[in-house]
Image (cartoon, coloured by chain):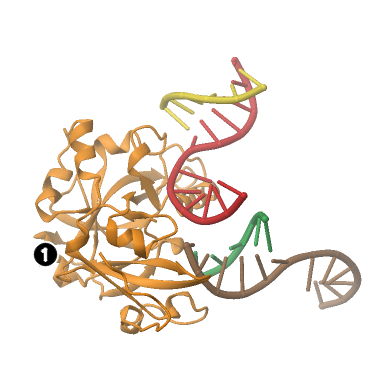
Chain colours: A orange, B red, C green, D brown, E yellow
Amino acid sequence: MMCYHYTVPDIDILRIRFEVSISKKIDFPRVYHVSGFVKPRLPVITNDAPNSIQMLSWGLIPHWVKDVGNATKFQSRLLNARSETIHEKPAFRSLIKSNRCLVLADGFFEWRHFEGRTYPYYIQLSTGEPFAFAGLWNNWTNPDTNEQMKTYTIITTWANPLLEQVHNKRKRMPVILHKADETPWLTVDLDRDAIDSFLVPFEANKMAAHPVSRLITTKGTKKNVPEIVKPKEYPELPAIKL
DNA sequence: CCAGACGTTGTT
DNA sequence: GTCTGG
DNA sequence: CCAGACGTTGTT
DNA sequence: GTCTGG
């Protein structure tokens, strides 16, 4: 896949892990689940302000979008950007050179399809540590109000052997950066090959995945609750083997 | 030249 | 089958 | 992505 | 803004 649903640590854990300052105006508790389709504002570190965390709206709006109606359409369609075509697509090719960012998280959700049913999984690093997805950001000006709106998208790549089995329909996964690559990713003057070297699947043996309940796709329930990431046994579901 | 798309999924 | 809402 | 809806009429 | 299709 892709990545349309993820989790975010609380502000104190982010401050320590990413060694950044955070505006006093920004404060939020842990996010146990957020869906990109509601255009949430979430913590991101951009290359033009690498020492601070900002709240950006998930779903990229290219600078040439002319009105709010189209901006909304683009947002829900540009939650992800394919790494394989990111240097060519009009929406991304200029941003990949100059507007890279870290999207702060500590887990994400994907769906496994098995015998006609859908099983949600929660995926983390084996250590449970926070990490950053590789992302692109953009500053869009609403022509009607002149208001600025910063938005971002998460870059995807082909699935590693773990995600091939979990996200078995699409076999894609979000790009997770190694900790040592986070600062280099935000360096402005990277050439194309250097950029591409980051856009690869994270090692499967450093990740863990477990099935969770269908709370995540149940209408009318609160989803930002600890139970949503709790492991759930499905007896009919074969184990994943690496 | 103008008009329209600009994306990821999944599905075929 | 296809669209909308989350 | 998944889940759930998928319509017209008339009336307010 | 920039590219593609007509």
Q: Residue at x 53, y 46 (%)?
A: A70
- Say what amino acid the circle numbered 1 marks: Arg
Between residue A165 and residue A216, name the one nearer to us: A165
Q: Position of residue A51 (x, y in %)?
A: 12, 53
Left or right side of A231 for A205: left
Tell me the residue that label 1 is attached to: A17
Q: Residue at x 51, y 81 (%)?
A: A220
Between residue A81 and residue A75, name the one nearer to us: A81
Between residue A137 and residue A119, name the one nearer to us: A119
Left or right side of A70 for A34: left
Left or right side of A200 for A121: right
Residue A156 visible here: no
Between residue A208 and residue E4, name the one nearer to us: A208
Q: Position of residue E6 (x, y in %)?
A: 67, 22
Quadrant of the image for the N terminus of chain A? bottom left
Mark 1: secondary structure: helix
Q: Position of residue D4 (x, y in %)?
A: 61, 75
- The correct choice, above or below, for A126 with respect to A81 in the image is below
Quadrant of the image for the C terminus of chain A? bottom left
Left or right side of A39 for A189: left
- The correct choice, above or below, for A12 with respect to A80 in the image is below
- The correct choice, above or below, for B3 with respect to A1 in the image is above
Q: Label 1: few (<14), some or many (≥20) within 10 Å?
A: few
Residue A137 visible here: yes
Q: Quadrant of residue A171?
A: bottom left
Chain letter of mark 1 equals A
In this figure, what is the number of numbered marks?
1
- The correct choice, above or below, for A26 with respect to A50 in the image is below
